[in-house]
Image (cartoon, rainbow, N blue to C red):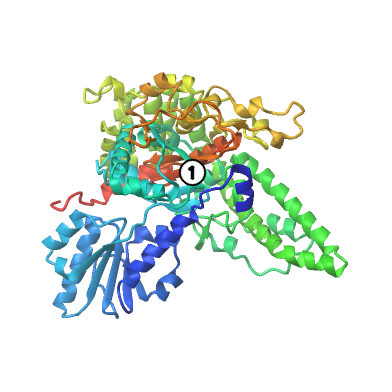
Amino acid sequence: MSSEERTTETGPLLDTNILKEIAKKDLVNALNAVNGAKTLVLDSTLAGPLGLVTEVALLKQHGVDKMFWLEPGPLTSTTSNIVYLCRPKIKYVKIIADQIKRHAQEAKKHMYTLILTPRVSTLVTRILEEEGVLGEVTLTALNLQFIPLAEDVISLENEFAFRELWVDGDETVLFDSAQGLLSLQKLVGPFPQIVGKGDYAKRLSSLLVRQNKTPTSAAEAPLSSAANVDSLIILDRKVDLITPLLTQLTYEGLIDELIGIRNSHVELPVAIINPPPANAPSASAATASTSAVPIVNVKKDAKKKYHLTTSTDPLYAELRDLNFSNVGRKLNTVARRLDEDYKTNLQSKTVAQLRDFVGKLGGLQTEHQSLRIHTAVSELILPLTRTDVFNKSLEIQQNLLASYEVSAQIAAIEDLIAQGADMQIVVRLLCLASITAGGIKAKTLENIKRELLQTYGFDYLPMLLSLAQPSLAMLLPNPLPPSLPPSGKYPFSLVRKSLRLLIDDNPEALEEVENDIGFVYSGWAPISIRLVQCIAQKGGVLSNPAEKEKPADEQSKSSIEKVQAHPIVGWKGFEDIVSTLPGETVEVAQRHDETGSALPPMSASPIKEQTSTTVVFFLGGCTYTEIAALRWVGRQNKGRRFLIATTGIVSGASLVESLATGIQSGEPKSASA
């Protein structure tokens, strides 16, 4: 969809590319501050985020001669200037200090600049001082904050935010999130109200309110008022741990589950992205090529990164949020349409008609290329969704969500361990069983842990201990241990009923207009998005607006009349159920009169002829299915759009692996460690 079409539908949108341009400008300024040619030593975890805002050619234009990864060991540089760019992590700073001392021993003269993102920390300064190299280094910051992943999604791209908050107890993420949201306010203006749920959501809102009361931030005018932001919704991941544990069933979500998406890029076999040269498109080319896609083993063949973006891939916007069961039908429809376009245009006879055809040819070829790639990706995914382990995992998930024969599901998980299924699949199912059933029988849980360690290795013992600690409480025995209060038990049954989470799957309703936000899990509504609906689409929690507004003749589902969005008035109407969820409840009004006194929440009367933006921030990460579900909510209303912000994109696999990797890496948590 073009920007003009988006503007017509919902009013002027915030152009998230502004954030990209700001980040690019800051990077260029940081590099230009170092005169002459320079060697850039880069933290590998920043390669993906930086790749979304700049390209290697731009770095070379601004003096970067060579680039190296920041790794232990000697560093050989042909330039006198060495620029380090990394996150303020202890292990990176110690590597840098070691390389500087090596150069001193070898009598090599260099000038060192350390660019830290998103900010310079006192801890880094202290370590450099302890290592005796602080005087050799010029410290500066690269304010790399929110990066646009899509036209309505921005991310801090911190893949370890969940682990840092709930396992390490490192609250740096809160400060970085606050700085990112404050920078966003400079673009769109202050958030009139903040609504949220969770202990860390409360702390983040307090940081924002405190900062907004400072004279400097209050005096700053927004760069653009087009977004017309009405509120900020903050949800911390602890409020809904069930959603990331489930297998995502949207097209984009399944790509992430089965192949993996990092920084909006997916690694695909080279034969898919760059196929052998073919003849110019003919009348039958559009359909013939899609049926002749090479079948390539996604795990073994040479890979190349492919950027999943709607700006260069015209079909991706149509496919990304579909339930995977509908993707094949959609691809077939597009293939037939392209075939008709080629046939019609090749029949052009007059010069004017031929000129029009040549003008359209570029667009047709781009769409044809996109169709070929997504057909190939679908063919890669399809066999993986037909494996016994995948379908058994789905069956166990659905039964646990329905609280059906929990003991049998536990036994089925043990069978998966015996079969040697992926560790992350087993751990996700165990955690899901624990949260939905209020814990697993103590003796049974101990036996399963023993089996798991014997099968996958005792290196995972620290991870299992972390999952059981009170701050996370994802894998607990029943009855609960004394260290965890009774309130630590997740109110699953109550929430499932009150928020209408379990929905009858109606395949016919998924054909063109999804039946409910539950389409992302084929019948299960993400708790996090139901909570957003409690605030921004109250009627959608109790019943499905798409069903109510379905045309009686069923001939044109696309002609559904949208309902005018209601003003946001906090958790009103859902206070009781929200209070049962873990963590504090947030409702803060930031609207002030001329004297500085807080004004009451906005009127509950409908807003007419006005489009507002609601920013939804996921603290601890969000999944692609939550993004798809929130887009669905936005499509049901007129007068409101959503800007989705997050610390990073997560899945059940990435959460489990981050817990395991973080503990196994042995990364010190303090300078004295």
**Foreground pick, 574 / 317:** 574
Viewed as shown, does residue 273 lie left or right of 177?
Answer: right
Q: Residue at x 51, y 44 (%)?
A: 253
Residue 206, image x, y percentages: 29, 37
Residue 235, image x, y percentages: 39, 35
User: Can I make out residue 573 in this image?
Assistant: yes
SS at mark 1 in the image: strand
Q: Residue at x 23, y 52 (%)?
A: 667
User: At label 1, which amino acid type do we have?
Assistant: Leu
- Vertical comparison of 288 with 236: above or below: below
Residue 553, image x, y percentages: 77, 28
Identify residue for label 1.
643
What is the tally of numbered marks visible in this picture? 1
User: Can I make out residue 417 in this image?
Assistant: no
Residue 554, image x, y percentages: 75, 30
- Vertical comparison of 23 with 587: above or below: below
Viewed as shown, does residue 329 lie left or right of 147?
Answer: right
